[in-house]
Image (cartoon, rainbow, N blue to C red):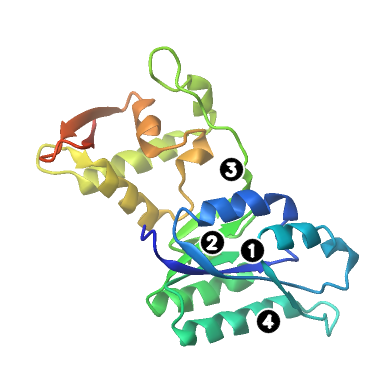
Amino acid sequence: MIKDLKIAVLIDGDNIPSKYIKEMMEEIAKYGTPTIKRIYGDWTKPHLAKWKNVLLENAISPVQQYSYTTGKNATDSAMIIDAMDILYSNKVGGFCLASSDSDFTKLATRLREAGLQVFGIGEKKTPDPFIVACDKFIYLEILNTPVGKPGANGKTEKKNLYNITPKVIRMLKNSVTDAADDDGWAFLGDVGSLILKKHPNFDPRNFGFEKLMPLFKSLDAFEIEQRDQNTGRFKLIYVRNK
């Protein structure tokens, strides 16, 4: 990811719980610098009162949007219009759309067509069309969930593997095959990039692991090899299917 990427963070206040805001902003900072931070909602409604303090603490600008008609989400429309204005201003290189609402699917697609990176953040109930329209989608639930700790043997405890299904392992093996050289070895960074292209909501933290390497290391279906760089500063991690 481009660490100096300027990101516009647009939050659907009707759709994102305020309890996640601190972890959410810390997560966004991993991918770039949030230069525009706005949250949309009808601030006359009592259910948004919890946002008041966290907005001040995180320098997020509230945008008032009255509900003109019952059953219509005016907040979504305001957020989409602002996103297009920001797009044409050429002030950012990426967007973070925080919502679990599939109404933003077309917006995410349009922003990517314009060459911008799009990060989605929402709850696990988020519909698939919005997830796959983003370059990367992060589930809110994993942001404050503890990940597995390495045991005495250096491997993460097996209890974290409860939701690694045969389907997931098959996807990992296929990705290794697609990125592998003639000897079957694939650079782990290339494997991770390929997985994200196929499955934007893939994240090792979904399975209790902080990084991709511990996830692969915990599975008996793969071999791991560390290779020295020419500079000697870092080791390159390669993976191969058994």
Q: Give the vertical position of 50 relative to 223 (above or below).
A: below
Q: Give the vertical position of 78 relative to 103 (above or below).
A: below
Q: Which residue is mark 2?
A: 120
Badge 4 amino acid? Ala
- Residue neighbourhood size for the residue with mark 3, other residues' Cα within 10 Å, grouped as few (<14), some (14–19), many (≥20): some
Q: Position of residue 168 (x, y in %)?
A: 43, 39
Proximity of marks 1 and 4: CB atoms separated by less than 8 Å: no
Q: Position of residue 187 (x, y in %)?
A: 22, 42
Asked which secondary structure carries label 2, the reply is: strand
Asked which secondary structure carries label 4, the reply is: helix
Q: Position of residue 13 (x, y in %)?
A: 73, 66
Proximity of marks 3 and 1: CB atoms separated by less than 8 Å: no
Proximity of marks 3 and 4: CB atoms separated by less than 8 Å: no
Cα–Cα span, label 1 and label 2: 7 Å
Q: Which mark is residue 99?
A: 1
The quadrant in which residue 142 appears is top right
Along the viewing direction, whichever of 235 and 163 lies nearer the viewer: 235
Badge 2 amino acid? Gly
Asked which secondary structure carries label 3, the reply is: helix
Proximity of marks 1 and 2: CB atoms separated by less than 8 Å: yes
Q: Is residue 216 left or right of residue 139?
A: left
Query: Is residue 10 visible in this depiction of the protein?
Result: yes
Cα–Cα span, label 2 and label 4: 18 Å
Cα–Cα span, label 1 and label 4: 14 Å
Q: Which residue is mark 4?
A: 78
Q: Is residue 25 left or right of residue 185?
A: right
Whichever of labels 1 and 4 marks the residue nearer the N terminus, that label is 4
